[in-house]
Amino acid sequence: MKALLPLAAALLLPLQAEDEGWTPIFNGKDLTGWTPKLRGHELGKDPKKTFVVRDGAIAVDYSNYEAWGDAFGHLFYKEKLSNYRIRLEYRFIGEQIKDGPGWALANSGIMLHCQEPGTMGREQNFPVSLEFQLLGAPNGVKTTGNLCTPGTYVTLDGQENRNHCIGATPPTLPLGEWVKAEAEVRGGKVVRHYINGKLAMEYGNAKLDGNDGDAKPLIELQGGDDLASGWISLQSESHPCEFRKIEIQKLEE
């Protein structure tokens, strides 16, 4: 994959030690600092307890559901961020809930640079964001660490790319296996996805898509289409999964 920045410019980006300055943003006990947004409900309302804490992990749980019902959900971290790394471990468990869409089998994600959670519509499926897509082996898609772009688009390999989902390189892994995922986010200029410590994909020049109904009012609100900061959220998309060891490392601009 071609670099998005000339080598000289890339060398100017400040580096931090791999294990320096990481801060846990999930305490392993409860959802302090995190707020749910479920389709069909107001921010902060999760009547079926989709997001719960179990055995030191945030679990996406459907035990209180009879069927899926398009209940797309996201769990938002409290802080708006621009230059940072996030790392966590994820795994898929159990079976997809009844009537979950086929494409959502063993499918979840870390949503980067999300719109402010309070601006999401009551019936909105996904926040405008850059989705670090996480997939398990039964999905049929053979890679994980991919990119999906609800209301956004990016530059990849030097060219504007408006595909909704763009494949990465790491293979999907079996259900029940913990996988390490990490993203390096430098504003909207460069974003890198890593799976189990290996680079999965790199892209940049992140933009809000003026042709998207959810993104258009955000462009008007901020007076431009640059996507340089936002919130982090974890996704519920009809297959039970778990997230643990969630940490961020703030970076210099």
Image (spheres, rainbow, N blue to C red):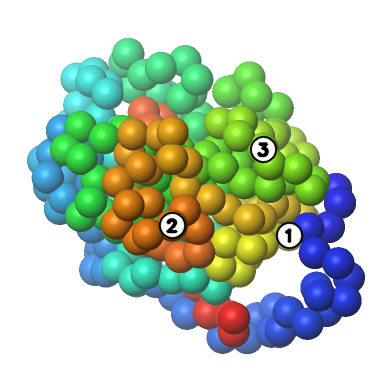
Residue 72 lies, in percent from the top left, at 30, 33
Residue 153 lies, in percent from the top left, at 56, 42
Q: Nearer the viewer, mark 2 or mark 1?
A: 2
Residue visible at 67% across and 62% down in the picture = 190
**Secondary-structure class at tag 3:** strand
- Quadrant (top left, top right, bottom left, bottom right) of the C terminus: bottom right
Q: Nearer the viewer, mark 3 or mark 2?
A: 2
Identify the mark nearer the N-term, 3 or 2: 3
Residue visible at 61% across and 69% down in the picture = 186
Q: Amino acid at mark 1?
A: Gly
| 78 over 125 or under it: above or below | below
Q: Amino acid at mark 3?
A: Asn
Q: Nearer the viewer, mark 1 or mark 3?
A: 3
**Badge 3: residue crowd in 10 Å (few <14, some 14–19, many ≥20):** some
Residue visible at 25% across and 29% down in the picture = 71
| 121 over 5 or under it: above or below | above
Q: Nearer the viewer, residue 113 or 59?
A: 113
Question: Which residue in the structure is indicated by mark 3?
Answer: 161
Q: Nearer the viewer, residue 33 or 161?
A: 161
Q: Nearer the viewer, residue 249 or 53?
A: 249
Question: Which residue in the structure is indicated by mark 1?
Answer: 197
Identify the mark nearer the N-term, 1 or 3: 3
Cα separation, mark 2 vs mark 1, equals 34 Å
Question: Which residue in the structure is indicated by mark 2?
Answer: 224
